[in-house]
Image (cartoon, grey):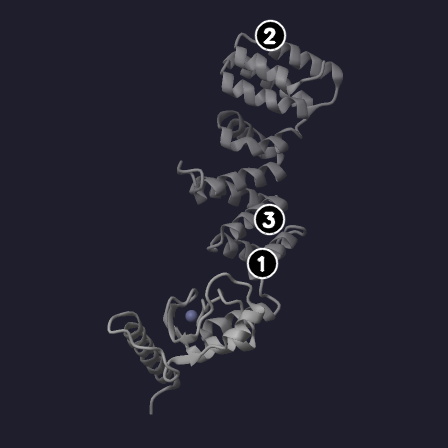
Amino acid sequence: MKSGRRRREEIRLKRIERAKRLEARLSAPPYAVARPGDGVEDADRALLARHNNTCGTLPAFYIDKVFTCRDCGQEQVWTAKQQKWWYEERLGPIDSTAVRCLPCRRARRTQRAVPGANLLGERRDRLRALGARPPDADARAEVEAALADKWWGLRTTAIATLGAWGDAASVARLKTLLAEHAARDGWNSWNRQARAAAFKALGACLPDDETAWALERYLGESEAAALRDGLARRPPAFWEPVIDAEWRRGEPRRLQRLVSLLPMVTAEPARRQRWRERLEAHAEPGVRRWAAWAWPSR
Ligand SMILES: [Zn+2]
């Protein structure tokens, strides 16, 4: 006894064979005439004309057609009978054509019909929701699973969830992620996206004991710009010695990054004025320009 699967496979191959033979007969000399029968169906042109607004010609016949399924990549036959049903009973547009085999169409339909069809979106929502309460072992496992998922969007959300938790274990995990994705490659690489997401997540939580580490990353590399939000929450007094140290160090890029952060630190007019005047007096024109840009109002 043959299994159903085996039997279906044989039918599929036979149909493909027949359709290809038919196509060859109709498209090469001596040209055969398409006649209703095996693999050919009459088309009702009058009916097609009523619901198709096309300037192309309408078919006189439907002919078994071989196509490659978009989902499983298998060759399949869209039979003349199926085409007639599609165009004349379902009134499918004449330029529409089969793109998926029956099993894949069914799979797609069930997938869409049940809750969970938008699996990716649901997992993202769930990951975000996890971030709203302190993590337990299950929640951490779910985040780890998402970090290993093939979808970048899911991984990015998992990284943001670690930032929303912001506990010591999550911060450590974020720093591990930064180390794991340290390679410097193209703009569109996962490594780069992972680093950007990790910096952003760290910027969102940034515990006090990570301040020194974060400050060094922020001042040292443009990629770490997202740490700014976390650093800007440090009190004004924290920044006085930082400004002194960076002023002495005198590296324009570091000073520029410092300048773009300082206006977020305090709303105190006197202190802001003092910082701005100091940085606008710097010998480096780039630093002066940045200071003027960062504190536009006088
Ligand atoms: Zn398929």
The answer to whether 112 is drawn above or below residue 172 in the figure is: below
Between 115 and 162, the one nearer to me in the picture: 115
Q: Residue at x 65, y 54 (%)?
A: 129
* CA gap, disc 3 and disc 2: 42 Å
Secondary structure found at label 3:
helix
Q: Which mark is residue 123?
A: 1
Secondary structure found at label 1:
helix
| Type of amino acid under label 1 | Arg
Residue holding disc 2: 281
Local packing at callout 1 (Cα closer than 10 Å; few below 14, some 14-19, many 20+) is some
Secondary structure found at label 2:
loop
* Sequence order check, earlier mark of 3 and 1: 1
Q: Tell me: 274 left or right of 14.
A: right
* CA gap, disc 3 and disc 1: 12 Å
Q: Tell me: 151 left or right of 131.
A: left
Between 271 and 242, the one nearer to me in the picture: 271
Give residue 4's quadrant in the image.
Answer: bottom left
Residue 244 appears at what percent x and percent y? Answer: 58, 14
Instruction: State the residue lying farthest toward the left.
Output: 30
